[in-house]
Image (spheres, rainbow, N blue to C red):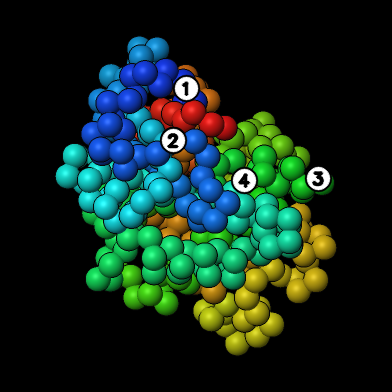
Amino acid sequence: MYRAAWPWFLLALSGAQAALRPVAERLDGACGDGPPGPDDLASYWLVSTWHGHADRTDLNELREFNVRPLLLHHCVVQSNVGEFLDKAWMNGLSVVVELQPQLFLEPTTGCFVTGFDCYERIKVAYRQMLNASGIWSDDKYHPAVQALLLARDPVALAATLGGSGPHAALLGIVSAWDGVLGAEMDMGVARPVPLDITVLLPMALPSRTTAADACFRKKASQGGCAGSHSLRAMYVAAWQEPGFMRTLDLPDLTRRGFWPPDSTARVEEAVYVPHNDVFSSFLSRWVQMFPGSPSLDEIVTYLRQFQEFLPSEYAESGGKHSSLVELNNTWS
């Protein structure tokens, strides 16, 4: 039987708020409703294992692939975040922390607006979150915090700027991930870090190559191509050694950020050279979110195509549980 070696989240957008209320009410008003405020750097998702997925009849089959059903219920925390996390933990609930889209799209300072290099913007914001939000103390993340959601559909966020394609969005996300790692290093977060990192990506991206092309059947280490497969494309975007690890044979590549140096004007042709080891973090901390409600066959095909793309030395990376996630909120 095929089993994914990596952790996976399946995301289904849904309503049905009446069934969700008991989850939030267990926190005695600590879980607010509506959109986050203009000064909020993050919002929060309560993770429940006993609601959602009423329309799915294939949960047992998904469990055979180590995929468990979860429900994520959106919360705006107006009071002390530490208290909210404490209450969630005491009530048997985990939390996913989401960075706010304004960090990427704010008209003058959003990092997608200023050229897609999100390292400094996210590093400063995430360091501020670690200092003030209660998600981290004593060198460790709060035990209720399960994952960090960098962005919901960065490809769509980039498209709102006009003319920016999926490669630009993925490089922006890789640089944001680099910023998170930089903030963790600055704050002395203990290693290994138990916090998963994820991004909501569409399963298929616009691409010049398809699954029918010969390169799609090759591993990444053999010149394989991502095609329209979003997780393969994420792998390609993240696959760069940090600048400090570059050899003396290529001294110019010790420069960190977008490469070549003038590539911000041609971001679709650029690579991002990170300050930290984003690729190793991608291999060990990534969890996958799927948009919509794909079928079991679509899920298995997607996972197999990614496993086939991984070089042999990475094929058994991870080994965490997989999750079927239903995302619920009263605002878009």
User: How far, Cα to Cα, is label 1 from label 4?
Assistant: 20 Å
The amino acid beneath tag 1 is Ser
Provide the residue designation for mark 4: 154
| Label 2: element kind | loop
Badge 1: how crowded within 10 Å, few (<14), some, or many (20+)?
Answer: some
Give x and y (percent) for residue 257.
65, 71
Q: Quadrant of the N terminus?
A: top left
Among numbered discs 2 and 4, the one appearing first in the sequence: 2
Q: In percent of the image, x 22 and y 45: which residue is there?
A: 87
Decide which of tag 2 and tag 1 comes sooner along the chain. 1
* Relative vertical location of residue 132 with respect to residue 282 in this rendering, above or below: below
- Dot 2 or dot 3, earlier in sequence: 2
Report the disc number at residue 243: none
Label 2 and label 1: CA atoms lie apart by 16 Å
225 or 23: nearer the viewer: 23
| Label 2: how many Cα within 10 Å (few below 14, some 14–19, many 20+) | some
Give me the C-alpha separation between circle 2 and circle 4: 23 Å
Q: Label 4's element?
A: helix
Q: Nearer the viewer, mark 2 or mark 4?
A: 2
Secondary structure of residue under mark 3: loop
C-alpha separation, residue under disc 1 versus residue under disc 3: 28 Å
Which residue, given by chain and number where applicable, does mark 2 sit on? 33
Please state which amino acid type lies under the numbered disc 3: Gly
Q: Label 1, on which residue?
A: 14
At 39% from the left and 65% from the top, the residue drawn is: 132
Whether residue 11 appears in this view of the structure is no
